[in-house]
Image (cartoon, helix red, strand yellow):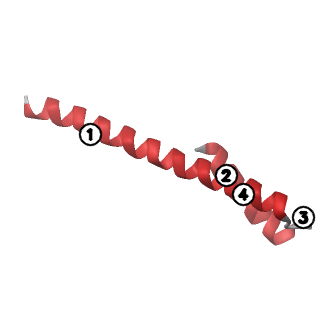
């Protein structure tokens, strides 16, 4: 998650002060990061659901 926070900060700094050309290669890299982030969110949601299910078992006992 920290990697994505850092990437978000880098994008903001680049937007404000950068001189990088936004071309097809940059676009592909950004889309790759977006896909990785979406996968991370899906995995986190599955993990969170699993933990809540385990907690509910112990609550019912």
| Residue at (75% x, 61% y) in the render | 11
Q: Earlier in the sequence, mark 1 or mark 4?
A: 4
Gap in angstroms between the C-alphas marked 1 and 3: 44 Å
Q: How many marks?
A: 4
Q: Secondary structure at mark 1?
A: helix
Q: Which residue is mark 1?
A: 52
Categorize mark 4 by other alpha carbons within 10 Å: few (<14), some (14-19), many (20+): some
Give the side of residue 1 with respect to residue 19, left or right: left
Would you say the residues marked 4 and 2 are in contact, meaning their CB atoms lie under 8 Å apart? Answer: yes
Cα separation between marks 3 and 2: 17 Å
For residue 49, say whether it is visible: yes
User: Looking at the image, do the residues carrying marks 1 and 4 touch, with CB atoms under 8 Å apart?
Assistant: no
Relative image position of residue 10 (x, y in whole percent)? 76, 57
Which quarter of the rendered picture does the N terminus lie within? Answer: top right
Q: Which mark is residue 20?
A: 3
Determine the CA span between mark 3 and mark 4: 13 Å
Q: Nearer the observer, disc 1 or disc 4? A: 4
Viewer-nearest of labels 3 and 2?
2
Image point (52%, 45%), residue name = 40
Q: Which mark is residue 33?
A: 2
Q: Nearer the viewer, mark 3 or mark 4?
A: 4
Left or right of 50, for residue 20: right
User: Which quarter shows the C terminus?
Assistant: top left
Q: Which mark, residue 30?
A: 4
Residue nearest the viewer, comparing 38 with 56:
38
The x and y percentages for residue 52 are: 26, 39
Work out how far the residue at label 1 is from the one at label 2, CA to CA, in angstroms: 28 Å
Inter-mark Cα distance, 1 to 4: 33 Å
Determine the residue positioned at 81% across, 71% down: 16
Question: Answer yes or no: do the residues labelled 3 and 4 have beta carbons within 8 Å?
Answer: no
């Amino acid at each position: 998650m920290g990697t994505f926070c850092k990437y978000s900060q880098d994008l903001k700094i680049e937007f404000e002060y950068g001189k990088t050309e936004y071309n097809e290669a940059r676009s592909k890299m950004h889309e790759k990061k977006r896909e990785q982030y979406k996968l991370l969110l899906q995995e986190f949601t599955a993990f969170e659901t699993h933990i809540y299910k385990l907690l509910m078992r112990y609550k019912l006992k």
